[in-house]
Image: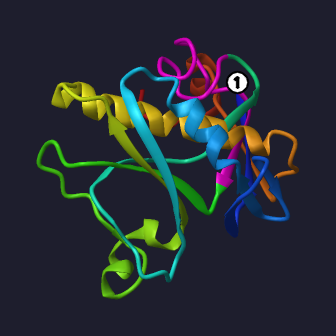
Amino acid sequence: MELKVGRILIRDIQFSEKTAVLKSTLYINKSELIEYLKEDINISDVDIEIAKPGESVRIIPIKDISQPIIKVSGRGQVFPGFISDVDSVGEGFTKVLEGCAVVTSGKIVNFQEGIIDMSGPGASYNSFSKLNNIVLLIEPIDGLSKHKHEATVRLAGLKASYYLGKAGIDVEPDETELFKYNTVTDAIKLYPDLPK
């Protein structure tokens, strides 16, 4: 079994008329992404901000962070059980947008400590401060339980990562890595000296 991962380097992010990747820039159609996320009946409103390294920005509270990604070939699709049906997905060809992340945020409903400083002394303590971040500000409907609120926000992040990952489907990756997985029987033959 083989999994090929193509990494597409993203150096900048901008809002635009069309969601696409061109010359290491991720262009996002903000209104289209908002409408896609608002298909969830538990979301009353969404806003999207871009936070770039070095900007005087603090993102708090962080609910979840995911990477824009798309499965190009092979079984299943990304985020099985959430975005796609439950299936084995460790084979085929997957493309990942490197250098950016989807960050979900919203009002605090439980104790949370996630924070990203994009500049200043706090930035050196968080690897996500070095990425171009697409920040989803999710406002769930009134009366949603705390658990359902958190699940809704996290699902929105996965949906946004899938939506943005599709922008790289026809883009030539900057680098490609191949992962090979051997069956147990083949691995025993290949590495007879390793403990069983």
Res. 44 in view: yes
Nearer the observer, 64 or 6: 64
Nearer the observer, 191 or 65: 65
Nearer the observer, 127 or 176: 127
Instruction: Using a 10 Å C-alpha cutoff, classify the residue at mark 1 as few (fewer than 14 neighbours), some (14 to 19) or many (20 or more).
Output: few
User: In x, y percent, where is residue 167?
Assistant: 76, 43
Q: Which quadrant, please, contains the N terminus?
A: top right
Is residue 87 found left or right of 26 in the rendered image?
left
**Is residue 80 within the magenta segment?**
yes
- Here the colouring is rainbow
- Residue at x 60% of width, y 27% of height: 187
Q: Which quadrant, please, contains the C terminus?
A: top left
Q: Quadrant of residue 36?
A: top right
- Residue at x 85% of width, y 64% of height: 23
Figure label count = 1
Q: Quadrant of residue 164?
A: top right
**Is residue 161 within the magenta segment?**
no
Q: Which residue is mark 1?
A: 1
- Residue at x 78% of width, y 45% of height: 168
User: In x, y percent, where is residue 140?
Assistant: 32, 33
Q: Of the residues shown, which amino acid type is indicated by label 1?
A: Met
- 112 vs 78: above or below: below
User: In x, y percent, where is residue 103?
Assistant: 44, 52
The range drawn in magenta is 76-97
Res. 69 in view: no
